[in-house]
Amino acid sequence: MDLGCGCGIISLVLAYQYPDIEITGIEIQKELYTFARQNVLANGFKRRIHVVHDDIKNIKFTETGTRADIIVSNPPYKKIGTGRLNLDFQKAMARHEITLDIDMLIECSSRLIKNQGSLFIVFPFDRLQDLTQALSRHDFFPEFIRYVHVKADTKASRVIVCAVKNGNRQCSSPSSLFIYTLDNKFTEEYLSLFRP
């Protein structure tokens, strides 16, 4: 499942990378849901990616057929009352915790995922503590935390966290992911993420 799938980019990348999986994307915003559906059709994945227009708080695993083995999410990342709220409500919802905060995302994920299932989240580095506390409250334990840097000479801006529902309590930290080289080109590892 791709919770808050937006225009469907994460679902599409996963479908290209892993030809045997089926994905359910959930998107609350009608315009983004429409874009996601169009992108799925344009890329020939209508049998493998199913997009649902709804609030994830309303989704029950019985509606999706089964609990998910894996959930991915790139959720809203700014607390209400912090940063500048975008005047475009669609962008504001995507960036600020207006209808969904991190605790509610983890609670919904706990309901929708299988025991021992893996939850992958991209989140701001400076909110890692908020994320790990929410995971702990809902019996998810980080398996790894990977730091994401714009370049090798910048501090981490994001983290990719994989947490397992009722998993063990050992957490590793793989090498950092760098988006750009020092001469402002995409790194080979970053580019490889978009190749089938």
Image (cartoon, helix red, strand yellow):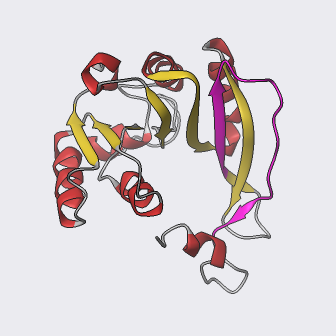
Q: Position of residue 163 (x, y in %)?
A: 65, 32
Quadrant of the rendered structure where residue 119 is? top right
Residue at 28% across, 49% down: 48
Residue 5 drawn above or below residue 165: below
Tell which of 93 and 113 is nearer to you: 113
Residue at 38% across, 28% down: 98
Q: Is residue 137 visible?
A: yes
Q: Position of residue 160 (x, y in %)?
A: 64, 46
Give, as a single range, the part of the protein colored magenta.
158-179
Q: Position of residue 99 (x, y in %)?
A: 35, 25
Residue at 24% across, 43% down: 50
Residue 144 drawn above or below residue 63: below
Q: Is residue 129 visible?
A: no
Q: Position of residue 107 (x, y in %)?
A: 50, 16
Residue at 24% across, 42% down: 51
Q: Residue furthest bottom?
A: 183
Q: Is residue 40 magenta?
A: no
Please give left or right for residue 169 compared with residue 70 in the image: right
